[in-house]
Amino acid sequence: MSGKVAIVTGSNKGIGFAIVRGLCKKFDGIVYLTSRDVERGKKAVADLEKEGLHPSYHQLDITEDKSIETFRDFIKQKHGGIDILVNNAAIAFKHNATEPAAVQAEQTLAVNYFAVLNTCEKLFPLVKNGGRVVNISSSAGHLSKIPSVALRNRFKDPNLTIPELSELMQQYIEAAKQGTQAPEWGNSSYAVSKVGLTALTMIQQRMLNDRDIKVNAVHPGYVDTDMTSHKGPLTIDEGAAAPLFLALDADDSVKGQYVWYDKQITSWERDTRSAY
């Protein structure tokens, strides 16, 4: 099969689900809703079909090599390539979580940074020249969330490599295990994971410039989802607006950027925005 293909990871609920909904309405191609749990994924597809929309479904657990490789091979064989990839799958511990900081650090970064990186490394060869990648970051992914000036300088180094960034992420996990992370890294594993994802976005853009692939990170806003314990003031469709803008409508000059939920390019280094 030829034609255009869009993929949204972790999209059986929340912002990912709303991104699939928006793509089904606006994207001239096939849209893949993916999820770790097959039954939840198929229920999400059925819910969208009741709205007259027709996403395709495939299982994808970004924490499992075999799952990513099975999905990659399926897409390659059936479609030959990817036009839009939205990296949405993520986890967050609740504010009142009782797990030790070391556990939260290791598990959060395993999904939000290392699993996303692994997924990208396996799927990027299929992204077509001129394609678009949207990494769902957060206001928590703003560089100002890292207290240490020295660390911030390393994250924003224009020559930072992926192995060096991954080593920084591992250093945070080790600091959390030692209980020494707070002064330099802060107290939020989620923030560190999203700072890492945003830094990864900048590196990926540099690496993919010669293929005219646009890679951007986006803060979707404080959205009413399971992840926010339904405290966010924005609906999931409002949270999907900026990611959909980057996937479909942003000018080709928008690449390697950190974009706010109002679709405006925002400084990743200078804290010029209110939190939500």
Image: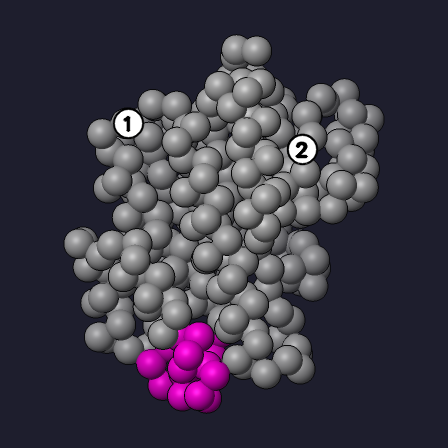
Q: Indicate which label's residue lies in the foreground, 1 or 2.
A: 2
Q: Residues within 10 Å of mark 1 (few under 14, many from 20)?
A: some
Q: Residue at x 22, y 29 (%)?
A: 210
Direction from residue 110 to residue 44 in the image, left or right: right
- Can residue 122 be seen here? The reply is yes
Given the image, on which type of amino acid does mark 2 rest?
His
- Can residue 259 be seen here? The reply is no
Give percent across and percent down for residue 179.
46, 88
Given the image, on which type of amino acid does mark 1 rest?
Asp
In the rendered image, the vertical position of residue 163 relative to residue 151, given as above or below: above
Q: Residue at x 22, y 75 (%)?
A: 150
Image quadrant assignment for residue 38: top right
| Residue topped by disc 1 | 212
Give percent across and percent down for residue 185.
38, 77
Compare marks 1 and 2 and give the one earlier in the sequence: 2
Image quadrant assignment for residue 171: bottom left
Extreme residue in the front direction: 66
Region of the chain picked out in magenta, as a range: 172-188
In the rendered image, the vertical position of residue 31 relative to residue 205, given as above or below: above
Direction from residue 54 to residue 214 in the image, left or right: left
Q: Is residue 35 magenta?
A: no
In the rendered image, the vertical position of residue 261 relative to residue 157, given as above or below: above
| Residue topped by disc 2 | 58
